[in-house]
Amino acid sequence: MNLLLLNNDDFISENRVRITDRRLQHLNAVNQASVGQSLRAGLLGGLHGSAILLSINDKAAELQVDLTSAPPAKLPITLVLALPRPKMLRRTLQSIASMGVAKLVLINSYRVEKSFWQTPFLQPEALHEQLLLGLEQARDTVLPELILAKRFKPFVEDQLPSIVANTRGLIAHPGDFPECPRALSEPVTLAIGPEGGWIPYEVELLSKAGLEPVQLGERILRVETAVPALLARLF
């Protein structure tokens, strides 16, 4: 935990907080924090700065906080990601939040198993937890905007064109396509398919919505590898 991420409910006065949940366990077990120690802290959706530990035991910790700095800037990207398998989803969400994706769409695809949409990892509290872990890792305080699109065709035809407007639209897809561009400064909408890629029908619909197929080479990457590789290449 590189950042103690706070909620408004943690504040017991203007500049003082009290925590009792997993963050307390982390301070005790991992950080082995002691009274007087200075920690990096931030308010979810707000500023970040420092916190001085005033007291700590196995039931609660109290800290004096000074939050004065803006969080790191988000990447100017909307990531349209075919829903990964549940165990991979957690790691991928953390990477997406850590790398600063501004907007994430988890979308259905022909190669996404129907059972993936039934996983408890898609419950709001589970999604929130994984994104928070990513923010804590990167010392960020702002969650990515998250959309769940369980129906591919209606989302791509009705909503995606307005998202792609005024951005560089790209589809990551293996095949005889141009190489993925590097070091862009313009906003991007990027679609990443499931392992095995999008089916041709999906590529066609995504292209009609304004996205251009690009590739990373001959190697087929796992989703959890492709996401950070593409984000690092683009920005």
Image: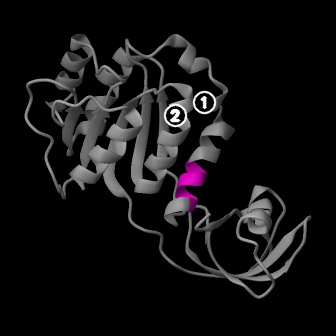
Residue 190 in the image: state x and y as whole percent: 27, 38
Q: Position of residue 113 (x, y in %)?
A: 48, 13
Q: Identify which residue is drawn at 57% across, 61% down.
A: 136
Q: In the rendering, at what x and y percent does residue 115 appear?
A: 57, 13
Q: Residues within 10 Å of mark 1 (few under 14, many from 20)?
A: some
Whether residue 161 is visible here, answered yes or no, is yes
Secondary structure character of the magenta stretch overall: helix
Q: Position of residue 118 (x, y in %)?
A: 61, 18
**182 or 30: nearer the viewer:** 30
**Is 34 positioned to the left or the right of 106 in the image?**
right
Residue bounds of the magenta highlight: 131-136
Secondary structure under the numbered disc 2 in the rendered image: helix
* Residue at the outermost bottom position: 36
In 3D space, how far apart are the residues under numbered discs 1 and 2 (Cα atoms)?
A: 9 Å
Q: Which residue is mark 1?
A: 122
> Is residue 109 positioned above or below 170 on the image?
above
Q: Inspect the image, locate mark 1, and give the three-letter code of the amino acid beneath it.
A: Leu
State whether residue 14 appears in this view. Answer: no
Residue shown at the point (40%, 51%) measured from the top left:
102
Classify residue 102 as left or right of residue 204: right
- Location of residue 20 by image quarter: bottom right
- According to the picture, the residue beneath numbered tag 2 turns out to be 89
